[in-house]
Amino acid sequence: MKQNNSSDKTIRRISVRLLPFLLLMYILAFLDRANLGFAKLAFQADTGLSDSVFAFGAGIFFIGYCIFEIPSNLILHRVGAKRWMCRIMVSWGIVSSLMMFAHTATTFYLFRFLLGAMEAGFFPGVIYYLTYWYPSDMRARSIGFFYFGIPLALIIGGPLSGWLLEFDDSAGLKGWQWMFLVEGLLAVIVGIWAYWYLDDKPSSARWLSVEQKQSLNALLNKEESVKHAYGPANFLRALTDPRMFYLTALYFLIQISFYGIVYYLPTQVAAIAKQKVGLLVGLLTSIPWLCALVAAFFVTRYSDKTGERRKIASIALFFAFIGIAGFALSDTPVVAMAGLCIAAAGLISVQPVFWTLPTSYLAGNAAAGGIAFINSFGNVGGFVAPNVKTWVEIKFDSAPAGMFVLAASALVGAFLVLFSEKLGLKGKVVTR
């Protein structure tokens, strides 16, 4: 489905207005979720917490996330994005700052659980929110731009976190305490800004003309009617739809590989560079995510241009498998870093393409709850990843063994996404 010139101008105006701000929000969300990886060594040295405690605390974030994800997105559907996004960001920013007081296993577990509970609904809320503004044949690149938040959080956040860690004993605080405090407060500030900046739907956007609103609504309503014809009528019906459970399993596998890399990348890069985690390691960890940024830019545009979703997602996951396995097998720093770059590129670029699959057939209440369901239970992979990786490494007394588990998860996911067409999952809404 090709857009006319008027529609193209409308989409460009929407993109200029919304995507940079949503990107900023996601940068802060992911930074507050993943900065624990940068704090790991200093945090454990100061608190005396073991690797097993760290792994469980890193993963328990996703338990709170999973429990509150679906209710959060259903509330967003009812009250609107601007109010609910403000609440989400301010509350998670406050909890992230409170991580500076996590001196025991109990407080560590509590704050990580609360961080997941407070952030729940942000990511699926944005994916759902984008369906209000973008037709299906523009959705991979719009979601892909939003996904730039992950590599940018780690490109910008790596040096920032490393720099803040060097403020050790400044004003009586450890470096990792400064890191949690500053990065959490940034989320609070942007959350308050979100209330005044975001519009719930195109109909309330004063920066769109009446003609632009009408043409966009006509196009999106046409797509919604097609979705209602072959998708579940509501969220309860979606819970009996096999497509949703298939996509949840696929997303679960992606997240195992992804978070297994994210949480341990700083320490892995530190080992390659033979340096402690600080500014230099923060800069080096930016390299894989810079590669991921470039890959996501081109992959999502190619996917929208060709309309191909499954094969592209499968190839991206296969490259992730090659990259992780190559890192695990290599003793050469350059080859190991190249493996991390390939893995990061594959794991970032696959995800916006993946999200075109559920958004191509879920509409209304079913979309709000269904997207949250897939994201919440799929993200349990973020809980599984550090714990399984640590258990396998201890069991086999081998660091590469844990990486092979992450590689295997990506490989199984590559095969699963190929067979998704048998369930009618194509990733584009055909309206004519």
Image (cartoon, grey):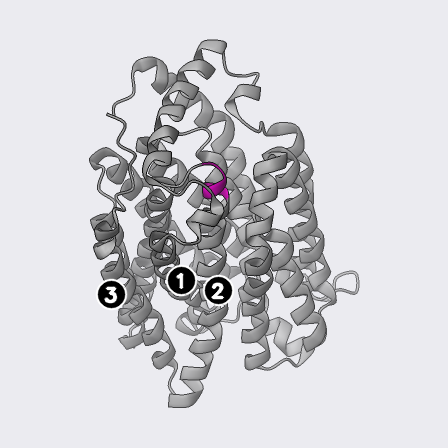
- Residue carrying label 1: 252
Q: The C terminus is located in which quarter?
A: top left
- Residue carrying label 2: 380
- Kindly indicate the quadrant of the structure image that contains residue 169: bottom right
Q: Amino acid at mark 3?
A: Ile
Few, some or many residues within 10 Å of mark 1 (<14, 14–19, 20+)? many
* Of labels 3 and 1, the one closer to you: 1
- Residue carrying label 3: 322
The span shown in magenta is: 364-368
330 vs 231, nearest the viewer: 231
Q: Amino acid at mark 2?
A: Val
Q: CA distance from mark 3 to mark 1?
A: 19 Å
Q: Position of residue 44 (x, y in %)?
A: 62, 76
The chief SS type of the magenta part is helix
- Under circle 3, the secondary element is helix
Q: Is residue 70 visible?
A: yes
Q: Residue at x 48, y 46 (%)?
A: 235
Q: Residue at x 66, y 36 (%)?
A: 83
42 vs 51, nearest the viewer: 51
Closer to the chain start, of discs 2 and 3, is 3
428 vs 281, nearest the viewer: 428
